[in-house]
Amino acid sequence: MKIINNIIKYIQKLNKKDLEKNLILILVIIAFSSLGITYFIYTKSNSLIQKIKSTKKLTFKTQNIIETHLKMQKEEEKLQKILEKEGDFNIQTYFEKFCASLNITPEGNWETLTQELPGSDKFDEVSLNATFKNQTTKKLIEILEELNKKDIVYIKELIIKNENNKKIMFDIIIANKKLKKSI
């Protein structure tokens, strides 16, 4: 209260010109203080908004990773059941029986190739590459339908080429997954 009384006495002693100077000085100080506080609040809030947006993006990415992981787990469980059901499945033996049942003969050598699956510590992939020449599209469809019936076998790659006599030639890679052998 004493401070306010001293300020009032000081203001009363001032002449009109000094009062206007002091009033302008006070208004300028208030204006610059207001601008400084507004700028500080703006930069802080903008920084927080950017952090919130970044966190939101990371949340979506994390959610997608979790969903992908769950999907992969389900696929692994499904594959595990198929492998348990099939026992000692051999793709080369299957392919030989398959070709005999459809009365088709692949060209050349069709040995199997076993590769590690990237990102999998449980499964390897066994693939078999075969070439069929002088075939019809109808026969190709029949082959694909029959291959599709076997759960453990999948078509990894198919390349179809036209031949001169209105027939086709196709290279097909079929594959299956198998459990890695424990050391």
Image (spheres, rainbow, N blue to C red):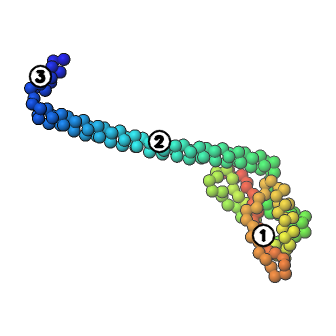
Q: How far apart are labels 2 and 3 at the CA level? A: 52 Å
Residue 9 marker: 3
Residue at 73%, 54% (x, y): give it: 178
Residue 130 badge: 1
Q: Residue at x 74, y 49 (%)?
A: 79
Q: Nearer the viewer, mark 1 or mark 3?
A: 3
Observer-nearest of 152 and 137: 137
Q: Amino acid at mark 1?
A: Ala
Q: Who is closer to the viewer here, 2 or 51?
A: 2
Q: Residue 60 versus residue 119: which sits nearer the camera?
A: 60
Q: State the SS at label 1.
A: strand
Sequence-wise, the earlier of marks 2 and 3 is: 3
Marker disc for residue 52: 2
Q: How crowded is the residue under tag 3: few (<14 C-alpha within 10 Å), some, or many (20+)? A: few
**Whole-percent x and y of residue 88?**
80, 53
Circle 1 residues within 10 Å: few <14, some 14–19, many ≥20: some
Q: CA distance from mark 1 to mark 3?
A: 106 Å
User: Which x, y percent locates residue 177?
Assistant: 73, 55
The answer to whether 142 appears left or right of 24 in the picture is right
Q: Residue at x 80, y 63 (%)?
A: 92
Label 3 sits on a secondary structure element that is: helix
The three-letter amino acid code for the residue at tag 2 is Ile
> In the picture, which quadrant includes the N terminus?
top left
Q: Nearer the viewer, mark 2 or mark 3?
A: 3
Give the mark nearer the N terminus: 2 vs 1: 2
Residue contact between numbered discs 2 and 1, judged by CB atoms under 8 Å: no
